[in-house]
Amino acid sequence: MNGPHPRPLVIGHRGAPGYRPEHSAASYRLAFELGADLVEPDIVATSDGVLVVRHENEISGTTDVARHPEFKKRKRTKVVDGQRLTGWFTEDFTWAELSKLRCVERLKRVRPDNREHDGLQPILRLRDVLEIVDEESRRRGRDLGVVVEIKHAQYFLGIGHDLAAMLLEELAAAGWSDRPERLVLESFELGVLDRIRGAGLPASYVFLTESAGAPADEPLNGAPKRGYGWYRSDEGLDLLAQRVDGISVAKADLIRLDAFGRATGPTSLVQRAHDRGLSVFTWTLRPENRYLSSRFRTSAHPAEWGDWQSEFALVLSSAVDGIFVDHPDLGVAARDAQAT
C-alpha cells in the first residue's frame, strides 16, 4: 500500500460505527459487507499484556464497565498524554476481566439508533480482529486489510508495556508478519513506528497528525520539540519521507477555507506529500451535521445528515489516497461518484 493509489482506499474507521457500536465484531464484519477495503482497530494493553481493541485505554464511554459492581473500585483518575481523565482503564484489568464487558455506543446523542445494539457483543483483542479480516477475505474472495493504530505508546511504555514489542509478537502469532500489502501501522507518535520498522516488519507505516498540538513522544531523539503543524510543512514532509510511507491527517487540514470560514477547495497538502513519495489518508468523513464543515450543514440538528456528498467529493478532489469513514457504504458511493 506504499505510495499514491490509483483510487482512494475506503477504510472502515473502527469498523462501521455509523451503524454498530465501534470496535465490535458486528461493526467490523458490516464494514466489509458495505465495501470497505480495510478496517482500523485501535490497540491498547491490559495488565497482563494482551492487546485489546478500544478507542482509548479509558473505557467508560465504549463499554458497560460502570454497570459491573465488581469493578466499581477500579475507577481511577489519571493523566494520559497530558489529559486528565477519570474512569476505568484497560491497564488496570486482565484480559479475563475485560472479556466480561460488552460494547456500547460511544456517540449516544448523535447515533441513538445504535444503542439498540448496546450490550450485545464482547470487546475484542487484536487477534480477534485479524481473524475476522482473514475470514472476510476468504468469504469475499479478495484480500482485505487492516490499519492498526497504536494508541498512547509512550504512556504505556512508561508503565511497563512496550506496545511495539507486543504488536510484533502478536502479528507473528497471527500469521500477519509477512503481509505488507495488507498491513498498515499508524500512530500519532513517530518513535513507536521507528522502533517497529527498525525491527524489520514489512508493512506500510503511516504517521498520524492532529490539526494542532504535538506528539506525546516529542522531543524525539534529542531534536527540538516539533508540533504536528511542523510535520505538515515542507521541511517536516521531507523528514517523514525518510521515516514513513505516508501520513494521515485531519479532514480539516485538506479543506481550504475563505475569510468567512467556508470551504472553498482542497489545500496543497496532498500534492506536496505526493511530490515526496508519501501517500495520504484523511480522517474522519462522517455525514452528520455535527461533523461537517459549516458550508455543508443543512440544519442546526447535529444528528441529521447534511450535504455529506459535497464534502466527501471536496475531500476526494484533493487526490487523497485513503479515507477513514464511519459509514463505509457512503465512502464507496463517494468514490464511485468521483470515478464517473
Image (spheres, grey):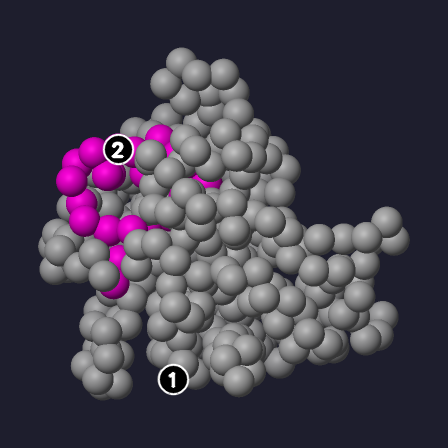
Alpha carbons under labels 1 and 2: distance apart = 34 Å
Q: What residue lies at 37% left-to-right and 79% top-to-bottom? A: 32
Q: Amino acid at mark 2?
A: Arg
User: According to the image, label 1 marks what residue?
Assistant: 33
Whether residue 164 sits left or right of residue 65 in the image: it is: left
- Give the magenta-colored segment's residue range: 182-204
Q: What residue lies at 64% left-to-right and 52% top-to-bottom? A: 267
Is there a contact, CB below 8 Å, between mark 1 and mark 2?
Answer: no
Can you give x and y, in whole percent of width and height, for residue 65 in the image?
48, 57
User: According to the image, label 2 marks what residue?
Assistant: 195
The residue tagged with tag 1: helix, strand or loop? Answer: helix
| Residue 60 - label | none
Residue reaching furthest to the right: 260
Q: What residue lies at 53% left-to-right and 70% top-to-bottom? A: 326
First of labels 1, 2 by sequence position = 1
The residue tagged with tag 2: helix, strand or loop? Answer: helix
Crowdedness of circle 2 by 10 Å Cα count: few (<14), some, many (20+)?
few
Classify 270 as above or below 308: above
Classify 330 as above or below 170: below
Classify 266 as above or below 326: above
Classify 86 as above or below 38: above
Foreground residue, 79 or 269?
A: 269
- Whether 197 is among the magenta residues is yes
